[in-house]
Amino acid sequence: MPRRKRAAGSSSEGTEDSDFSADLETAEVPDGVHRRSSARLTRASLRQSQSSQASVFTSGRRITRSQQGVTNATAKRYSLRQSRSSGSDTEANGERYLKQGEDRDETPPRTPTGNAPSSESDIEVSSPGNDLEDERLAKELSLKEAAACDLSHRPKRRRFHESYNFNMKCPTPGCNSLGHLTGRHERHFSISGCPLYHNLSADECKAPTERQLRYKEKVTELRRKRNSGLNKEQKDKYMEHRHSHGTSREPLLENITSDYDLELFRKAQARASDDLEKLRLTGQVSEGSNMIKTITFGRYELDTWYHSPYPEEYARLGRLYMCEFCLKYMKSQTILYMHMAKCVWKHPPGDEIYRKGNISVFEVDGKKNKIYCQNLCLLAKLFLDHKTLYYDVEPFLFYVMTEADNTGCHLVGYFSKEKNSFLNYNVSCILTMPQYMRQGYGKMLIDFSYLLSKVEEKVGSPERPLSDLGLISYRSYWKEVLLRYLNNFQGKEISIKEISQETAVNPVDIVSTLQSLQMLKYWKGKHLVLKRQDLIDDWKAKETKRGTGKSIDPTALKWTPPKGT
């Protein structure tokens, strides 16, 4: 029996696969054996196509022209696209091969070497009995693909609420941080999303009720009836109204929005006006010069004494909320909480020139920190009657005294002075906050102002007119200074000029204080200073009882006079 030609692309040494394919044609075997051989051949060719992707078109070495022509024609007709890719591509190609194997008339199977046969007589197509084997192989491939697509081995992605920091809590008292105003989240950590703050429960926020849905549909329907826009006549009418009345009248609101929204706005205006009248009747808001009744400053709520020229939208309010560090003023407590959460200030701006214990003094330049100094002046005007400086703060230096704790440096009081004063005023404005009054801080501020005058080698005096409380504080301070000086003086003759140079107090202030104490007498054409021992003894007793807690230590001052003063 003549030896058959080798198929194109087969091995030149006559491998067992090629002999096996040749023997299959001529051997006479039973049908069952033939079906098993065909099934084995199909499985072998499938495994070969899945594992070997490079040997399909490269195994042939010596091919005749006729074999090459047949191979090319076969390859064009029964080409199997394979690439050097991942295993999933190989499985997909194998599945396509199974589909081709089921159609025996269109796509013949390949040989165990992975090559297409040169003719239909080279290899027999699998009989219909092999369908069960093919279905089993297809099912195995589908199970492999399902295993490849299974993501159960990957870590489970956390839900949105599981990424919360559960150490955070809602600032609303009595709230357990459960629920959210939008109904989309299981927890909340701010007032804006707190159902309890908005007088709701967590269940009410989860889903809208039927009444809410009906109301929403009604509003949507009413808003659809709104006109698309203003025509030319309406625009001309609005512009004419605006030019004729300006800001003294409310602008025309018709056809700007839907009738429903306009009616809702009118109701809100009427309700706000009614609430304002109730506040005015109870005395919380007045139309006079004192609009702001109380301020919230840190942990204190302070009643104001005088009018301060705050902006009109703030002056109408009965209460003002202030940050005690940056002195920014706000309309509501919610805005204050939001500001305090992100405010980075813990002490006044400027240079700290004095510190002893928990008492510090900061020098703030009005030119460098204009906004802070303006807010400080507006705050001071609420408690001072004769203050006229509000916004022109650039020519002044502000010396702010604070008391420090673990939360920051809290404002105690301040005084301001001109950078270049021709009358040698060492204080232009001085204030002690009401919550720190009658505790010795006012005298500390006055003593500190005279300490700066001593360092400058000048004689200082406060700017007139003094307020009622300011005059009382200064006369008390001048009295203590004179009694201390007389107690330590050992000579027989005393001079007003020497006292002024020693204490940096203006001679006019010294004379007025001596007269108020009845220690200055005119006798035989001369002015005599009487040393009243009873006043000195009373002062010593009070000094011993008071102690040295509230006093200025000159050694704790680290300051050089600014240039140009």
Image (cartoon, rainbow, N blue to C red):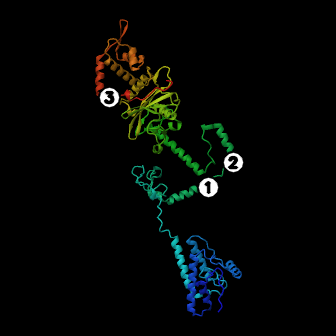
Residues at circles 1 and 3 in contact by the CB criterion of under 8 Å: no
Q: Amino acid at mark 2?
A: Asn
- Residue at 59% in and 55% down: 222
Q: Amino acid at mark 3?
A: Thr
Does dot 2 land on a helix, a strand or a loop?
loop
Callout 3: 10 Å neighbours few (<14), some, many (20+)? few
Mark sitting earlier along the chain (2/1): 1
Front position in the image: 213 or 398: 398
- Residue at 58% in and 51% down: 260
Does dot 1 land on a helix, a strand or a loop?
helix
Of labels 3 and 2, the one closer to you: 3
User: Is the residue 66 above or below the residue 487 in the image?
Assistant: below
Mark sitting earlier along the chain (1/3): 1
Say which residue label 2 marks: 231
Say which residue label 3 marks: 548
* Furthest-top residue in this view: 524
Q: CA distance from mark 1 to mark 3?
A: 76 Å
Say which residue label 1 marks: 224
Q: Is residue 112 left or right of residue 542?
A: right
Front position in the image: 48 or 176: 48
